[in-house]
Amino acid sequence: MDLVIFDLDGTLVDSKQDLCNSVNATRAYMGLEALPDDVVASYVGNGAPVLIKRAMGEEATEPQLEEALSYFLSYYREHMLDYTREYPGVRECLYELHGRGVKMAVLTNKPVRFSKEILVGLKLDRYFFEVYGGNSFTEKKPHPMGIDRLIEEAGAARERTWMVGDSSVDVMTARNAGVKAVGVTYGLKPATLEEAPPDLLLDTLAVFPVHIAPPITL
């Protein structure tokens, strides 16, 4: 393959606890009770503004949403690496693909600054030639804009490009861009892959290199 594009939350890194803690800290700041972690996790995937809008509920006014989002971003900035770690098999996958000369990038709906800081903090940043977030373009996933840009920058063939993620948003992004889709069965929203089946479904990214670029035997 020429290019592999990874989602971040739920695919490369397990950020569930830090996201849930930050959302509930925001709700407490706004005078609301905490939500169960699984409920908060179900709101993740479409960017911070959507996450906070869902977490605050339909009764929240626009000024309240703006205040809550500002607090959330500030709190999360300080706590985004408290518990966040890469999933088992991720580091091995990235190391193997990098060694085979496969270009890799991250495309997430998370704010790009946070995304880069997490990758740097976990020492995963060296594997990616580019990282784009939800505020990098005028459109977020599942719009194909991010994939189109990465294909152009990598000089990759569209038919030799893969998008890897844990949710239907990632699969739909791949479909909209005309590239292959890989889903993972762990993560934040793997159940949504039933409504948008990927081309390949994996329990761990450790085996991904064998599927897309088998080792050369002499």
Image (cartoon, rainbow, N blue to C red):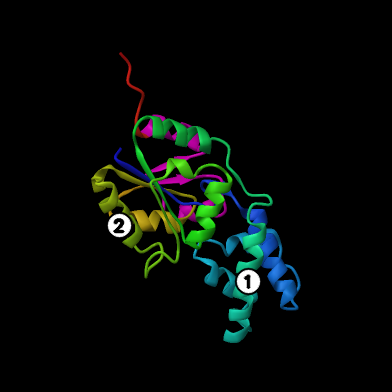
User: From this viewpoint, which residue is outermost toward the top?
Assistant: 218
**For residue 87, what is the image quadrant?**
top right
SS at badge 2:
helix
In what quadrant of the picture does the C terminus appear? top left
Q: What is the spatial separation of the Cα atoms under label 2 and label 1, in whole angstroms?
A: 31 Å
Q: In this picture, which residue range is highlighted in magenta?
A: 182-211
The vertical placement of 199 against 115, above or below, is: above
Residue at label 1? Answer: 55
Q: Is residue 110 left or right of residue 65?
A: left
Q: Which percent across, then down, holds residue 88?
A: 58, 37
Q: Is residue 34 visible?
A: yes
Residue at 73% over, 75% down: 29
Query: Would residue 70 be counted in the magenta stretch?
Result: no
Q: Which residue is mark 2?
A: 149
Mark 1: which amino acid? Answer: Ala
| Visible residue check, residue 191 | no
Residue 184 vs residue 37: left or right?
A: left
Identify which residue is drawn at 37% across, 68% down. Answer: 139
Q: Is the residue marked by circle 2 packed among few (<14), some (14-19), or many (20+) residues within 10 Å? A: few
